[in-house]
Amino acid sequence: MGVKSIYILNKAGGLIFQRDFGDSLSKLDSNDYLVIAGTLHSVHAITTRISPVAGSSGLTVMETPSFSLHIFQSQTGIKFMILTDRQQYGIDSIASRIHHLYSDYVMKNPFYTLEMPIRCEKFDRYLGAYISTVA
């Protein structure tokens, strides 16, 4: 499977959504996910400030021998972090579609409070269905 995990962070760097896909990842506990999200948020903020390019958006891709991490930040400051196989292509369109699903099923949900953890069954279901088609 191409997409291994998705993290969504609020403007302050708090983890508001996390989901693993497939069996390739070992399951972590909730504290580990919070530490990962906080670390990635910090690294992204630091790279935005130390970049030699004026107006840089900071860290957008990090590649290792076994996976790639892609970071997409929306206009509102929400960060979508997508962990994929190295061979996965079309990450920009995947991130755009995930943002679209977030906008449709989370932001339009009258019971959702901004900056709080996402507990939206429709978003989770449609996200899972979409990621299964990307693989």
Image: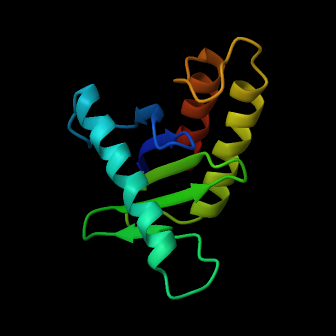
Image x and y of residue 43, in percent: 38, 62
- Depicted 48 relative to depicted 44: above or below: below
Image x and y of residue 40, in percent: 37, 54
Residue under the image location 64 percent in, 78 percent down = 55
**Which residue occupies the foreground of this view, 111 or 4?**
111
Residue under the image location 45 percent in, 37 percent down = 14
Asked where in the image residue 22 lies, by quadrant, the reply is: top left
Image x and y of residue 9, in percent: 50, 41
Q: How is the image coloured?
A: rainbow
Q: Is residue 78 left or right of residue 34?
A: right
**Which residue occupies the foreground of this view, 68 or 79?**
79
Q: Is residue 68 left or right of residue 110?
A: left
Outermost residue toward the top in this view: 111
Q: Is residue 66 left or right of residue 135?
A: left
Q: Is residue 79 left or right of residue 22?
A: right
**Which residue occupies the foreground of this view, 55 or 107?**
55
- Depicted 130 relative to depicted 49: above or below: above
Image x and y of residue 82, in percent: 47, 51
Outermost residue toward the bottom in this view: 52
Q: Is residue 55 visible?
A: yes
Residue under the image location 74 percent in, 28 percent down = 107
Residue under the image location 43 percent in, 33 percent down = 18
- Depicted 31 relative to depicted 130: above or below: above
Q: Is residue 84 visible?
A: no
